Image: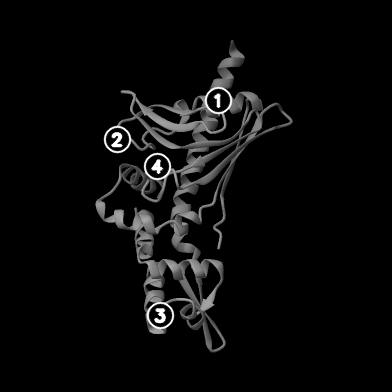
Amino acid sequence: MTYVVGALESLGALGDPTRRAIFERLAAQPSAVVDLARGLPVSRPAVSQHLKVLKEAGLVREISQGTRRIYSLDPRGIAAMRRWLDSHWASALDAFRRFADQQHEQELDK
Amino acid sequence: MSIDPVLHSVEVKAPPARAFELFTAHMGAWWPKGKTLAPNPHADIVIEPRPGGRWFERDAEGNEIQWGRVLAWEPPGRVLLGWQLNAQWRYDPDFLTELELSFAALAGGGTRVTLEHRNLERYGADAEEYAGKLRGGWPTFAGHFARYSDSQD
């Protein structure tokens, strides 16, 4: 349950167009606030505020490089979806194996 | 950024051609019960056997809900499906992640079935359009999904 709620909250953070633009820029290249602000019609403090929301949603993370802070995507946010799919497909393939082997045995017995 | 694909494989005793047929033509028989979109149990899960064919579940009354479509149909070795359920577990023709199944012959006569679900980063990049819907309540599949996640713990 936790995974689902986490995943949906993460996606909700991307509802704002500026946050989505920041997210997409970071998907292309990890960047500092100053670099992000340069290409967007918003101030640096506004970019920082959006980054804070994205960080809290688990979508973006921050790394210190000397005196600079570099932002990049945090794989854990989207990974909530991946974790569910991973578990789902493991279970589905196992169900397939049981079914296929049972069918195969029956066909050999004929 | 890309997210690692989900990758799993199993070995079955049937040869590749039969394993391919059992997987694709009998999905409704082996798919875990309750892991479908409709509130009612599925009567069948159909993959139309051709490129561009639909992939859908059907209940006992004949209601169909599409999951995706066939991108490549290459029996007995490979089938590539588009999994087009978005972050809200609804079919979206504009959303697509790839699910590839390969069927490789094993020395003892059986088959190794390998599954790869990729392009999962699209769940992040395509999120904006779903965000407004998230306040609308839980879709059915999310309910199944939640119970399923709970049962895995």
Q: Secondary structure at mark 3?
A: helix
Q: In the picture, residue A51 is in which quadrant? A: bottom left
Disc 2 to disc 1, C-alpha distance: 25 Å
On screen, residue A105 above or below B126? above
Residue found at x 54% / y 52%: B119
Please, which chain is the residue tagged with disc 3 on? A
Label at residue B91: 4
Q: Position of residue B16 (x, y in %)?
A: 65, 28
In front: label 4 or label 2? 4
Residue found at x 30% / y 53%: B133
Disc 4 to disc 1, C-alpha distance: 25 Å
Q: Which residue is mark 2?
A: B39
What amino acid does circle 2 point to? Pro
Q: Which residue is mark 1?
A: B22
On screen, residue A21 above or below B135? below
Q: In the picture, residue B129 is in which quadrant? A: bottom left
Q: Earlier in the sequence, mark 2 or mark 1?
A: 1
In front: label 1 or label 3? 3
What amino acid does circle 4 point to? Tyr
Q: Which residue is mark 3?
A: A48
Please, which chain is the residue tagged with disc 2 on? B
Dot 2 and dot 1 residues touching (CB under 8 Å): no
